[in-house]
Amino acid sequence: LDMKPYCMESLTCPKGYRYGAPSEDDGNKGGDAKTKGADGPVIDPEKEEKRRKLAKEERQKTLALPERSDNYYKYRLMGVIVHSGQTLNSGHYYSFIRERTELKEGEVPPKDGEKGARWYCFNDSSVTKFDHTKLGEETFGAKDGSWKSATAYVLVYERTRPEVVEEPEMKNVPTELLERIWHENRVRVADTNVYNIPYFKFLDKLADYIISRFPHPSSGVSSIKPVEVPNAPSDLQDAFTRLMLRFLFKTLARSLQRQKFWQGFLDQVKDLLEGNIATSTWFISMLIHPTHNWLSELITAPPELVREATVQLFAESAKTISPLERGAYESKAGEKDFIGGTDCEIVKPQRGFVVQAVDILLSQLEKKETSSLVMESLANFASLGPNETKYLQGANILKHMMEALTSEANSRHNLGDAIFMLLNTVKSDLRKEHVQVLFSPQFIERLLIEPYNVKRAKSVVDIIVYLCTPEGAQVTGCSSNEDAADVDGKAEATSRLKVVMETLTKQLKLNNYELTRPYFRVLSGMLRGSDEMKEFRVNLVADSIVDALNNTFNSREPLYRKTDFFAEHMLRLMEQCDSLPKAIISKDPNLLPGLVKFFEKYPDTSAVLGKMYLTLKRVEKKFHEIAIVSSKYQKPT
């Protein structure tokens, strides 16, 4: 490839001027005042003189360049980067590369394909010899109307006879620009070394060593108060735990490998924080620091694992510090939230570190859409002991929870396990105005659908059962300024149970049988206990079951999976409560004959429904002519 016609020395030469030769115009200093060509217009001498002057300056610039031989401008193809794919947005890259050979003075360069000039194909880990004569065929995507996916993407050329050129000195680069370039280079090198697997594994081994070398602080260390913790790390364990916390949230959280390493590092940080007053104080200080504001940021950060880790580590730190700060629960916030400025590492709060963090979480509840992780953090705080629960009660946590439970923003998604855990913690403080919210028609359906997993079911059912017992109804049936002794607990509990069961009966008729699973968990909870209201609850459950079964069996196109689903849950409820089958039979004498007709009409019904039928039939103690028609199972008689 000859590049001379495209270089400056060729492009700036006037027409008819040969680079390196004197110009014919150089000696022509004057001329007539006005000349006229044979066919051309009259030429203005001043304009002509100006044109010649500019042309001479351009020639002088060109002549200032060193004169080189024609070989200097000749290049040969050394490599081709190929893109294989149907679009620019996807595909595969590989390359063809020619051998490089250093030539001695006067030595003739080898031709393509000869020793020292052979071509190779580099395709991922595969390196093979390549016939250079097929280069055009292999890298030209379209030819004669045809189309191929492989196309030359970048062509790499090299000068045939390179000249030794001294590196130019960087004299004219501004100092500020140089400093910025070096800073960017240092950041790039640091990022390359930080976001890599060897560094992660190194920290992992170092954390294991620190944990084994420095056991958890003993109870004797509790004499250190959080307010006495210095800004600088107090010892090696404190320094390393701070490093690990920064690594977890600032480095690993941004790494593509976070899913693989996250849980292991999180467990290590928990071990390092356990009983560590200095680092726990530092971490909560970072969470509540006005400048950093980690608590608000991390608890709403996009990666779910970062949010959950923040909640877990806050709980671990609060468990260590809270016993030392319980005196702050009684104090009132001063004019300033923090003592001193905000430019230091650990900002000392006017009150306790944990209390300051809890106050920030409580302020989050006032927003329209409440994060379930805020509730979980408050529930973890309440679980630390009666002092913490009392603090939340004084902060009017029930008012905030009622607003969160009934807010329009939160109605679009589930409320999370934590809010029910927290509600259970303070359920004895529920009063008439709170219960009216929980048992309102627009909310009771929402409350009953929440037990979609076993963990949450226990929390929700515990609340409902507590509120529907005479004791719980008496305590929670009065207003804040009324006496509980004036409330008829049994009558109040009966009224609440009817509201719950009416809603359950209505929801059990849903066509989508999977949506009824939470309601069966509530029914199961209603059958627990042995209080004076037990028989009344069993009868209400039996009413609900009979109504739901009749609705299912009388449908035009019964869903077999739905009937099986109901039967399985009925069997579980009857196994749990011995008196339930008898209550079901007594509610509707036509239920069992209706089941027999159902079996005769739909002979492919599975044995699950038949087993439920036998269970109910045994209650009547009538075993004559129990006919179950099935093509898959033997006919019991």
Image: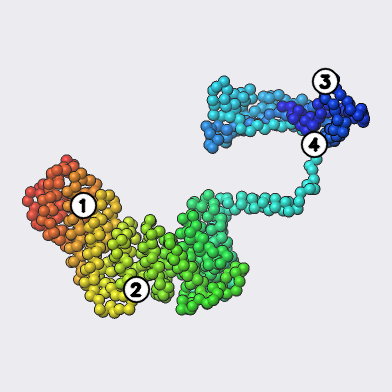
The amino acid marked with disc number 3 is Asp
> Which one is nearer the viewer's eye here, 397 or 304?
397
Of labels 2 and 3, the one closer to you: 3
Outermost residue, left side: 624
**Which mark lies nearer to you, 1 or 3?**
3
Of callouts 1 and 4, the N-terminal one: 4
Secondary element at image label 4: loop
Q: Earlier in the sequence, mark 4 or mark 2?
A: 4
**Disc 3 and disc 4 in contact, CB within 8 angstroms:** no
- Which three-letter amino acid code belongs to the residue tagged 2? Asp
Mark drawn on residue 429 = 2
Query: Does residue 243 sit above or below 392 in this rendering?
Result: above
Q: Is residue 454 left or right of residue 313?
A: left
161 lies above or below 383: above
Distance (Cα) linking label 1 and label 4: 91 Å
Q: Which residue is labeled 4 in the image? A: 164
The quarter in which the N terminus is drawn is top right
Comparing labels 3 and 4, the label whose residue is closer to the camera: 3
Q: Which x, y percent locates residue 169?
A: 80, 45
Whichever of callouts 1 and 3 sits on the residue coming sooner in the sequence is: 3
Q: Which residue is mark 1?
A: 567
Question: Alpha carbon of mark 2 to alpha carbon of mark 3: how far?
Answer: 111 Å
Left or right of 627, for residue 557: right
Question: Dot 4, crowdedness within 10 Å: few (<14), some or many (≥20)?
Answer: few
Q: Nearer the viewer, residue 40 or 593?
A: 40
